[in-house]
Amino acid sequence: MEVPDTEENLKKCICMNCPSYNECMKTGMQGLFCARGKTDCDLERLGCICNQCPISSDYQLFGGYYCAIGTDWDEDFGKAIKALIGTTFVPLKVAADIAGDIAENLGAYIPKPSKLASTIISTRISTLKTITKAIEKEITLLEEYKKKLEAEEAKKKEKVKVE
Ligand code: SF4
Ligand code: SF4
């Protein structure tokens, strides 16, 4: 659910107690990243406490690290998770639906997926696509972070050699 960027919500934000909340964010009096989007500060992911925040439960948020990855993926991901949970018994639903079709028309021995079954299948497909997108995004971010760490590591080694 979209989080409104209000003073009241900002007061409930617990980011300042988070290990990833750093001096740069503090100086900029930043917070409520789940509404305002990601920070422009450099940050190290040292943990996220969004799941303990009242805003998280009030607006049914699914993720965290909004300071690092922004907000646009959360709603899609949430929908995807809900759809996935709702379709846990897809094979049973599809089977029952097809059986219903057969019962209605005993002359037809080749079961056709009904509208309900095809809707469930379409939902399932779009769910999987959305989850794939979220995973791909996370992989890209992790790769970027890894590259940054490696570059920092290389710089440190250079420095040690010079000294
Ligand atoms: S969910 Fe996270 S970013 Fe949003 S208000 Fe709570 S602590 Fe801050
Ligand atoms: S969004 Fe999550 S990781 Fe970022 S400062 Fe807030 S609680 Fe910490």
Image (cartoon, rainbow, N blue to C red):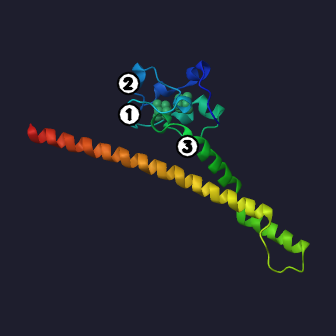
Seen in the image, is 154 located left or right of residue 12?
Answer: left
- Number of numbered discs on residues: 3
Residue at the (54%, 37%) spot, across then down: 71
Q: Mark 1 sits on what residue?
A: 43
Label 1 beta carbon within 8 A of ligand 2: yes
Q: Mark 2 sits on what residue?
A: 24
Q: Nearer the viewer, mark 3 or mark 1?
A: 3
Q: Tell me the SS state at disc 2.
A: helix
Q: Earlier in the sequence, mark 3 or mark 1?
A: 1
Report if residue 46 is visible in the image: yes
- Give the image quadrant in which the ligand numbered 1 is located: top right
Three-letter code, disc 3: Trp
Compare residues 60 and 30 and report the one nearer the observer: 30
Compare residues 53 and 132 and report the one nearer the observer: 132
Q: Position of residue 92 (x, y in %)?
A: 75, 66
The disc at residue 73 is 3
The quarter in which the N terminus is drawn is top right
Q: Tell me the SS state at disc 3.
A: helix
Seen in the image, is 23 located left or right of residue 73?
Answer: left
Q: Residue lying at the far left in this picture: please name it.
A: 163
Q: Position of residue 70 (x, y in %)?
A: 50, 37
* Residue contact between numbered discs 1 and 2, judged by CB atoms under 8 Å: yes
